[in-house]
Amino acid sequence: MVLLRQLLGDVLRQLRLRQGRTLREVSAAARVSLGYLSEVERGQKEASSELLSSICRALGVPLSHVLREVADHLALAELQHEPVMAGAPPEHERITTETIPETPEEITGELRGDMVAA
């Protein structure tokens, strides 16, 4: 079973590492103890919405961006573990890992395209 706190921790860690920042830097900016932030990143602690907001501000990333990325990872995990049900759409209509955006840039690019087309 996929735990939401583990996916959230993975996304937060990936964002921090992409920025080349240390746990110490982000914990100081977010005003969260280093140990607690480490436990959140490892999926050992459930972060409150206030704590998540503080971590996201410290990373300079909107909370909605983090939650979207977590949702994408969750969708992939569900696709990989869920059996194909009777009456499922034909193969060419199924959502696959190739149809789900991989990066935040792909996601925001699609959103901007949708807004322009509307």
Image (cartoon, grey):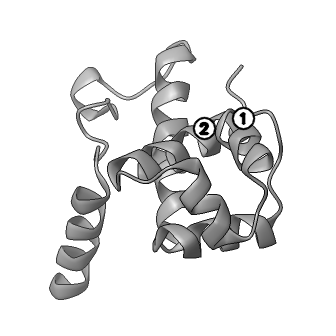
Residue at the (68%, 73%) spot, across then down:
54
Q: Where is residue 81 in the image (x, y as percent from the top left)?
A: 55, 15
* Mark 2: secondary structure: helix
State the residue in front, 103 or 82: 103
Q: Which mark is residue 7?
A: 2
Residue 117 in which image quadrant:
bottom left
Q: Which of marks 1 and 2 is nearer the N terminus?
A: 2
Q: Which mark is residue 43?
A: 1
Q: Where is residue 12 in the image (x, y as percent from the top left)?
A: 54, 50
Asked if residue 85 shows in the view, the reply is no
| Quadrant showing the N terminus | top right
State the residue in front, 23 or 112: 23
| Quadrant showing the C terminus | bottom left
Count the numbered circles shown: 2
Mark 1 neighbour class, 10 Å CA radius: few under 14, some 14 to 19, many 20 or more = some
Kindly report which numbered mark, 1 or 2, lies closer to the viewer in this rendering.
1
* Mark 1: secondary structure: loop
Residue 74 in which image quadrant:
top right
Residue type at tag 1:
Gly
Asked if the residue under mark 2 is in contact with the one under mark 1, i.e. CB atoms within 8 Å, the reply is yes
Residue at the (80%, 54%) spot, across then down:
47
Q: Distance between the residues labelled 1 and 2?
A: 7 Å
Mark 2 neighbour class, 10 Å CA radius: few under 14, some 14 to 19, many 20 or more = many
